[in-house]
Amino acid sequence: MAPMKKNPKKKNRSGSARKAPVAPMAAGLRLLPRLLAFSASSRPLFAAHSGALPLPVRRAGPSMPLAARARRGIGSSTGAAPPAEDEDFATAADLRFEPPLEVVKYPDPILRARNKRINTFDANLRALADEMFDVMYKTDGIGLSAPQVGVNVQLMVFNPAGVKGEGEEIVLVNPVVYKSGKRLLVFEEGCLSFPGIYANVVRPESVKIEAQDVTGAKIKVKLSGLPARVFQHEFDHLLGILFFDRMTMDVLETVREELKNLEKKYEERTGLTSPETVESYKGTKDVFSFSR
Ligand SMILES: [Zn+2]
């Protein structure tokens, strides 16, 4: 996940969030100062985040899924379904990589490919995670998933501080969301696979997750605030879901031209036809409603 655009305006924190309803687009931006302040702190990621994040978004209906369904046959995005018995794990070949890693850009089909679970926790895995952190810092990211560097496995790294030596470096392997908070927040996201594109995405404010660390040890933790946001963005990547899949149609319209530009660049670079086109994408409108 790319860091959010810096908001040039200084915000007066007192009471601004509770005032009369604000336009949804602005709502995401309003969160920035607080979240950036949070990200810059040295607070451990897994500590409880006491700073409330206001601006809940009403759910559109009782049966609304955690998020939009992605295209290409991806079903539940909660990841809560247990892995199939016959699931095959990533092989050494699947986990092979060659530094320096480069960020895979939309619409490369690697971003939509299935990501295999990992059951080999060795030096190679640690090296891959280290390389991913390097790429993330170099590209000013705050989170990165393995498919984004061309390795289709269930691995993500993130550090909401976005700076080496600051914050906390988190490596999560085979993550699963087993519970999502009811409160939804709109927040402006960027993605390293979509350079220069930023737009509002609605997600739960908190998630309870299970995962393994780079040694294979089990982790069970509740994330909220920016770590929850970054986690969910990267977790989507592991399901082949991209952040524009989760934008409302209104928001998608604001980035449609930029997405088309990326598709054009891909075609020029590879000589291939873009494997997907936002032009034909009808989106997932009505999943979230911004209307008051
Ligand atoms: Zn991303």
Image: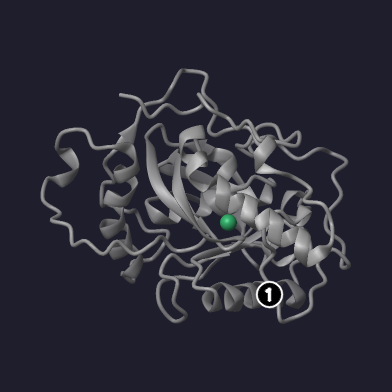
Q: Is residue 65 above or below residue 15?
A: above
- Which quadrant of the structure image shows residue 192? bottom right
Q: Is residue 150 above or below residue 98?
A: above
- Which quadrant of the structure image shows residue 39? bottom left
Q: Which residue appears at 31% of the width and 56% of the height?
A: 32
Query: Left of 62 or right of it: where is 263?
Result: right
Q: Position of residue 38 (x, y in %)?
A: 31, 62
Query: What is the image's colouring?
Result: one colour
Q: Which residue appears at 55% of the width and 27% of the height?
A: 65
Q: Position of residue 64 (x, y in %)?
A: 51, 23
Residue lying farthest to the top in this orientation = 62
Label 1 residue SS: helix
Mark 1 surroundings: few (<14), some (14-19) or many (≥20) residues within 10 A: some
Q: Position of residue 164 (x, y in %)?
A: 47, 80
Q: Is residue 150 above or below residue 63?
A: below
Residue type for callout 1? Arg
Quadrant hosting ligand 1: bottom right
In depth, the one of 221 and 250 nearer the eye is 250
Q: Which residue appears at 60% of the width and 75% of the height?
A: 135
Q: Which residue appears at 59% of the width and 40% of the height?
A: 245
* Location of the C terminus (image quadrant): top left
Q: Is residue 235 visible?
A: yes
In depth, the one of 208 and 96 nearer the eye is 96
Query: Left of 190 or right of it: where is 119?
Result: right
* Residue behind mark 1: 126
Q: Is residue 151 visible?
A: no
